[in-house]
Amino acid sequence: MSPRRRLRVFETEFGRMAVAICYDVEFPEIVRAAARAQAHILVVPSCTDDRQGFLRVRYCAQARAIENQMYVIHACTVGSLPMVPAVSLNYGQASILTPSDFPFSRDGILAEGSPNQEMMVVGELNLRTILDTRSAGTVLPLFDSKRSAEIASAVSFVTLSQPGFDILIRHTRRDDFESIIELSRVCYPDDVPWTAEQLAAHLEVFPEGQFVAVDRTTGLVVGMSASLIVRWDDYNLETNWQDFTANGTFRNHDPAGGRTLYGAEIMVHPASRRQGVARRLYDARKELAIHLGLPRIRAGARLRGYHRYAATLSAADYVKAVVNGTASDPTLSFQIAQGFRVLGVVKHYLGQDGESLGHAAVIEWLNPRIAHEAAGATLSRA
């Protein structure tokens, strides 16, 4: 049953107060819904046949009191009814629980009975204190819960490496150049590798945008990511990689006027693929965009699998199939899984590339913090 249907509203000197009854205190969403419906007191009846079950309910009840800044009255069954199998044995301890803040008892327990004793516990519930705590407490968990989606979107997850494959993501250094050049030869054997001059230019204009993935066990560079900031209005969807990157030098990097982080390169050694290296490089790039307050990341997704479909599908139709899940592309499918969306298809993004036939999909990732702020501003204007 909806928690709103279990609410009882009373008129008090402090205004309208609500009492909620909850038999499923283990589910925080139910109690949160009641708290947002102005419940200030939660009554939790419980029937548990052992101490372990009782403690599960008790700890959850205490958590609901803290996170929703409300009183929780835990009423338990105790004793034995041998003639009723479902309640032949009961373990319980009645209590009145409070938020964990200065106006309340230090341990968050206003009143408490003796374990497995039939008795009544009495405590004075100050509803004004609940109101004050929700608006001006030491912490404001109920108020902050409105921002749960925003907070969750900004969480950085630490990935535990597989045994023997401990990867470090860090900014590129000059002593990485030789390794990056060799890595590009392995990843693109039919293309011209990065040069030391290009890599040096990247560090000169935008060192924060350059990352490498290093295998801690061997010290080898197994992945690399390179990006720059551009003013998107200076380009269009048909612009090729050479123009977006100033022939690979990033001399067009525009931190003053640009609002788009452009992903010029991400590559992973073939022997280290499917190990989470690319995802961690993408995560580093996303964290950079969030840190710099940039609204988006855009890039050209090299359509590595297009050559297998070129005889029957146009590049645009191939991309649609990949987006719809009826075809799979080694690059684009992965990028879609990382939260990117397709904006269009470019015919001559790359040079003579046998796998993509020169085609790329223009992709975009939106900074969730910027999107949330923009939505909030729109609502406030409305």
Image (tube, rainbow, N blue to C red):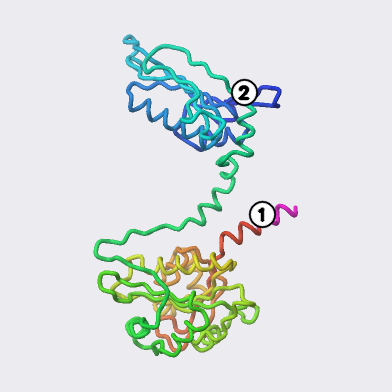
Name the residue: 53% across, 35% down: 101
- Work out whether 153 lies above or below 194: above
Labels in figure, total: 2
**Which residue carries the number 2 mark?**
8
- Precedes in sequence: disc 1 or disc 2: 2
Question: Which amino acid type is marked by label 2?
Answer: Arg
Q: In the displayed structure, does residue 105 sit left or right of residue 231?
A: left
- Work out whether 121 lies above or below 365: above
Where residue 255 sits, quadrant-wise, is bottom right
- Is residue 178 a member of the stretch shown in magenta? no
Q: In the displayed structure, does residue 29 sit left or right of residue 93?
A: right
Where residue 187 sits, quadrant-wise, is bottom left
**Pick the front one: 84 or 354:** 84
In the rendering, at what x and y percent does residue 372 appear? 61, 57
In the rendering, at what x and y percent does residue 320 appear? 51, 69
Secondary structure at badge 2 equals strand
Question: Which amino acid type is marked by label 1?
Answer: Gly
Secondary structure at badge 1 equals helix
Checking the image for residue 376, the label placed there is 1
Q: In the displayed structure, does residue 115 sit left or right of residue 19?
A: left
Dominant secondary structure of the residues highlighted in magenta in the image: helix
In the rendering, at what x and y percent does residue 325 appear? 45, 63
Q: Which residues are magenta?
A: 375-382
- Work out whether 155 lies above or below 167: above
> How many residues crowd around disc 1 within 10 Å: few (fewer than 14), some, or many (20 or more)?
few
